[in-house]
Image: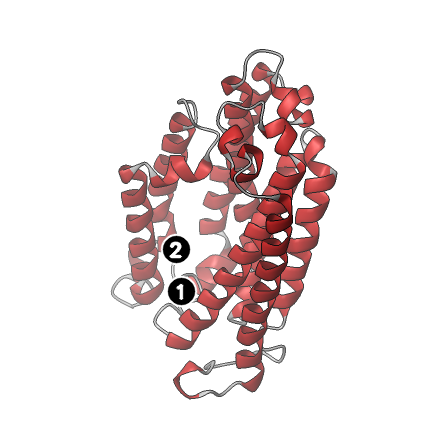
Amino acid sequence: MLFSGRFLEFGAWFQSIAAVAGFCLVSSAAYLVNDLRDRQGDRQHPTKRFRPIAAGSLSPATAIAAAAVMVAIGFVLAGGAVMLGVRGSVGVLAYKSPQPLGGAGLLVWLGGYALLNMLYTFWLKHRAIVDVLVVAMMFVMRAMGGAAAIAVPISPWLVVCTFTLCLFMAVAKRRSETVEMPPGQAHEVRKAHLGYQLDTIEHMLTVSAAMALMTYSLYCLAPRTVGHIGSGHMVWTIPLVIYGTFRYYRRCHRPGGSDIVAVLTGDRVMWLVIALYVALVALITTFGRLDSIKPILDV
């Protein structure tokens, strides 16, 4: 919504929220299945042993039933967003320029996301390097689903930038998990840790951070981006992205760095950086093409 300039459209908000809710429900169902399968290993982990299934406060039968209900509701919500796009005109909720598919791609991406989650839970999570690549791809599928929900063109840069950033976050999580567990015990919780030594994963973390920053910078300079935004002023967002990446890099080295949500939500400065980034992008996409501002940078 932000990069397409549709953040002022009520209909786009409605469909985006429906897509977010659908992915959240399917994701939550996948977490239940994952925790059910990993309950024995989680009981050996210093923090994961408090998860409801591992701790015994949530029965396996209840977890399976809840997962099934959440998947069903998630696809119903996504289907509602699709139907709204197919109709193309539902009062103030209508698309201004609906694409022929009307957002039907959302169901495809949501279904692929659910399938990839199951493959990850039962097989791919146990294979070093493959596991972090799959985690990053699941974030890409969320972004692709969001673009499909409001029927906007999908840029290859959306895939590259999302993938590299989320790869960095996934590697940071593996690094923290390796450090938090006693030496030689991390693989008892997750088999993939057999393929991660601390020095190796530190190099992977550095490389993935560099890739994230480089791909985002190239995105800001790409002719397609300049043409879409109407100016080259996206370059002014690069310092914020660098600061946010470096700050996350530093915080993930602290105790509890394996919990991505806790790292992000527990840092007020990070929230400020994100808010400033969103505000700056909104200003650039709205006013960056004006004749009085556009010529500041020679593109």
Q: Nearer the viewer, residue 165 or 227?
A: 165
Position in image of residue 292 (x %, y %): 25, 65
The amino acid sitting under disc 2 is Gly
> Visible in this render: residue 159?
no
Task: State left or right for residue 259 relative to residue 190.
Answer: left
Q: Which mark is residue 158?
A: none
Question: Going 54% across and 57% down the picture, which residue do you hit?
Answer: 25
Q: Nearer the viewer, residue 270 or 222?
A: 270
Position in image of residue 56 (x %, y %): 56, 36
Task: State left or right for residue 117 relative to residue 205.
Answer: right
Q: Rate crowding at label 1 as few (under 14), some (14 to 19) or many (20 or more) other CA atoms within 10 Å.
A: some
Point out the residue furthest to the top here. 183
Q: Nearer the viewer, residue 190 or 197?
A: 190
Position of residue 91 relative to residue 213, above or below, is below
Q: Are marks 1 and 2 in contact (CB under 8 Å)?
A: no
> Visible in this render: residue 42?
yes
Instruction: Name the element at disc 2.
Output: loop
Could you give the CA–CA distance between mark 1 and mark 2, rounded to whole angstroms? 7 Å
Q: Rate crowding at label 2 as few (under 14), some (14 to 19) or many (20 or more) other CA atoms within 10 Å.
A: many
Q: Quadrant of the N terminus?
A: bottom left
Q: Quadrant of the C terminus?
A: bottom left
Q: Could you tell me how many numbered marks the image carries?
A: 2
Question: Going 47% across and 45% down the picture, which residue do you hit?
Answer: 216
Position of residue 129 relative to residue 286, above or below, is above
Disc 1: which residue: 230
Instruction: Name the element at disc 1.
Output: loop
State the image quarter where residue 119 is shown: top right
Disc 2: which residue: 232
Position in image of residue 261 (x %, y %): 43, 40
The amino acid sitting under disc 1 is Gly
